[in-house]
Amino acid sequence: MMKKIFIIDGGPRKNMNTAQMVESFTKGVQDTSSEIEVKHIRLYDYDFHGCYACMACKVKGTKFHDYCGRKDGITDILQEAAYADGMVFASPVYYGDVTAQTKCFIERITFPWLSYENFSTNPPKKNIPSAIIYTMNAGEENQDIIENMCQHNEWLLGMFYEKPDRILAKSTKQVKDYSRFEFSEAMAQSHDQWHEEHFAEELQSAYDAGKRMAEKVMD
Ligand SMILES: Cc1cc2nc3c(=O)[nH]c(=O)nc-3n(C[C@H](O)[C@H](O)[C@H](O)COP(=O)(O)O)c2cc1C
């Protein structure tokens, strides 16, 4: 039977940095195994919210331990992704964390798996490999902020999946042509330069992570 890796893409732009990192990760998976289906979900295409706190997943005897019982635009995705063989979250960094859509999705997929009886975490499939792809304006000079954000999300997702692989694209080109926008000259120059010198390596790191995940999934 085909294995399934879900890529939950919380970025709004379809051809920019996050999209390219996702494409590279996907290629890494596909070059490693033809027995893995990659499902790329663009959250901005769906109408949904974060956890509604309806507590349907905490009612005594509930059938909603595996997936969220609340119906909205991502109900079908949540049901399928609960049984994924590999899970990837990809997001631009907005105000120091993943985007609101990404966060909403994480709440919805994981909250049913958290027990309020004994605070154990009970995803329907155990030890599923996971990864987080971040793309961001921040560069090497913001290492501390990046580290804090990554550690927090690795702690959170690590309760439900295998500790996520960390894939970063820093100092991204936020626009294709800086001359059209109100960005400082220094920012434009440094980001153009970083892009020129490092973006190919960052894409390669996404590709390598895709290969690693595929190998784990097929193991
Ligand atoms: C609303 C908004 C908030 C942002 N906040 C941050 C931030 O806190 N830290 C950061 O490093 N970059 C921040 N950025 C920049 C984006 O994370 C970065 O350009 C990213 O690579 C964009 O991804 P995309 O090209 O796939 O859209 C922000 C961008 C937007 C639009």
Image (tube, grey):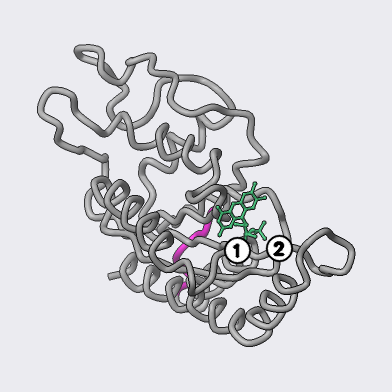
Is 104 magenta? The answer is: no
Residue 61 vs 153, above or below: the answer is above
Q: What stretch of residues is rendered in magenta?
A: 33-39
Residue in the image at 60% along x and 42% along y: 43
Quadrant for residue 162, please give it.
bottom left
Q: Is mark 2 within 8 Å of ligand 1?
A: yes
Please, what is the three-letter code of the amino acid marked with disc 2?
Answer: Gln
Which residue is more in the foreground, 60 or 195? 195
Q: Earlier in the sequence, mark 2 or mark 1?
A: 1
Task: Describe the element under mark 2 as helix, strand or loop.
Answer: loop
Between the C-alphas of marks 2 and 1, the distance is: 7 Å
Residue in the image at 72% along x and 56% along y: 14
Q: Residue furthest right?
A: 180
Q: Is mark 1 within 8 Å of ligand 1?
A: yes
Residue 200 vs 37, above or below: the answer is below
The percent position of residue 16, horizontal first and vertical second, equals 70, 63
* Marks 2,1: beta carbons within 8 A: yes
User: What label sits on residue 137 in the rendered view?
Assistant: 1
Quick check: which quadrant has ligand 1? bottom right
The percent position of residue 9, horizontal first and vertical second, equals 56, 51
Quadrant for residue 167, please give it.
bottom left
Q: Is residue 65 left or right of residue 4?
A: left
Q: Is residue 99 left or right of residue 58?
A: right
Q: Residues within 10 Å of mark 2 (few under 14, many from 20)?
A: some
